[in-house]
Image (tube, rainbow, N blue to C red):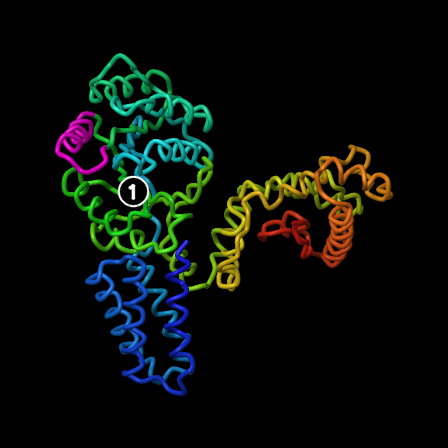
Amino acid sequence: MFENLSDRFEKAFQRIRGEATITEANIAETAKEIRRALVEADVNYSVAKRFANRVKEAALGRDVLTAVKPGQLLVKITQEELAGFMGSAHQDLNLKGKPAVILMSGLQGSGKTTHTAKLALHLRSKHGKRPLLVACDVYRPAAIDQLEVMAKRVGADVFTQREQKNPVEIAQAALRHARSHGNDVVIVDTAGRLAVDEEMMDEIARIKQAVEPSETLFVVDAMTGQDAVRTAQAFHERIAFDGVILTKMDGDTRGGAALSIREETGKPVKFVGTGEKPEALEPFHPDRMAQRILGMGDVVTLVEKAQEQFDQESAKKLERKIRKNSFDFEDFLEQVQQVKKMGNVKDLLAMVPGMGKALRGVDIDDDAFKHIEAIIRSMTPDERKNPDKLNGSRKSRIARGSGRNVQEVNQLIKQFSEMKKMMKMMSAGGNRRGLSGMMSRPGLPGGMRMPR
C-alpha cells in the first residue's frame, strides 16, 4: 500500500539530501514536492496544500537550517506531521454497554458485510468477545446468506429474520436475543446503495436511534479515492459516525482516502482491510502508517503479528529441539504455517526498515510457501524426522510427488541443513529465541530462498 506516494516522498527528500546547505528556498521547494506527491495520491488539493504548509512551518520553526543533518530532520518532521494528519494515535472501539452495539454503515460494494465478519473475528480472537452478527440488509439478494457464511467462517453467532422486512425491528429483536444468549457485542450489518440517497440514510438513522450503538462505523472502499471522502462527509453529516474502516488497502497504491478522511471529517480511521482473508483486518495506527509511507518500516506491527502466532510454550519446545539438534522438517513445516498466518508475505517484508523500497515493483505471491510445503508433504513421516535418509531415489520420488524438480528438492534440503547449523550456533551463543524468534522476522530463516 502507498507505493506511489512513498516513491514521490523519496524523490522529494533525495533532492534536499543532496544539498550542501539547507535554505528557506529549498525547504519551500521540498514542501512543494510534498504537496504534489499528496495530490497524485488523490488527496484533495486544499488538504495537500495545508499539509505541505504545516511541514514548511514546522521545519522553519525547528531551525532546520542549522541542524547537523537537516535532510534527516526534515524527514522526521514530515513523519510527525503525517501521523498527526491521520489522527496521531490509534483509537480503540468503544465497547460500552451490555451488549455493546456496533452499527456498520456504507455504500453497497464497499465490503461492509465482509468486514462485519472480519471485525467479529478481531473481537473474538483479540478481545475474547462473543459477537452476534445481525443481518439487516433485507434488499440485496443473498445478503443474509453471505453474512451467514462469513459468520460460520469466523466462528461468530448470527441473527436473521428472513420473513421480517423491517430492519429496525430486526435490530431490536437481535438485541433481545443477544441479552438472553450471552452475546456481549452486537454488530449490525445495514443495507447500502450504489450511491448516497435519502431512503438509505433515513433507514440507517432509524436503526441507530432504535439500538443506540456505542460505536457507529463507516465502511468505505479506499480505491474510490476522493469519492470516498465525499461519501464519508455525506454519511457523517447525517448519522455522525465514530470511525472509519478503509477496505481494499492492499490494492490501493495511492492511499488518498486514508490521508484525507481524518482531516475532512474529524473522525479517525480505526481499521484497514488488507486482503480477502478473514484475518486481513489491521487496527490503524497513524504513527506506524506514516513510518511505512516514508520507508521507515513498521517493526512494532511486525512483532505484534509474530507474537499472535508464536506462543511461549511452543517456543520453549522448539528451543529444546534446537539445542538437541533434533529440529526436523516436521517442525519446519509447522513454523512455515504459522508465518503464513501472519498475513501477506510482501506486506510483512515491507515492515522491515528499508525493505519497502527494495520490494517496489517486485511481485511476491501470497502462496510463496506452497512449493516448500508441497516438497515437505511429499516426504514420509520418517523422512521428515530423519532428513539424512534422503538419498537419490527418495529425492526423485519427492520431486515427482510435489510437482517440482530434483534440483529444487536438493536446494531445500541444503538450505534446511544450513539453517539448522545457524540455529545451533545461535542457541549455543545464548540466543534463546530459537526459530520462533527468527520466524518473527518476515521471510524464511537463515536466508532461505523460496523455490520458484
Q: Which residue reaches farthest top?
A: 163
Position in image of residue 117 (x %, y %): 39, 31
Look at the image and give the residue range highlighted in magenta: 193-210
Q: Which residue is mark 1?
A: 220
Q: Secondary structure at mark 1?
A: strand
Residue type highlighted by circle 1:
Val
Q: Quadrant of residue 25?
A: bottom left
Q: Determine the residue positioned at 26% across, 29% down.
A: 190
- Examine the structure image and report whether residue 203 is included in the region drawn in magenta: yes
User: Where is residue 77 shown, x and y percent of the image?
Assistant: 34, 70
Residue under the point 76% across and 37% down: 400
Q: Main secondary structure of the magenta part?
A: helix
Residue 288 percent coordinates (x, y): 41, 56
Location of residue 180 (image quadrant):
top left
Asked whether residue 101 is drawn in magenta, I would say no
Give 242 or 118, whichever is nearer the viewer. 118
Residue 371 shown left or right of residue 149 in the figure = right
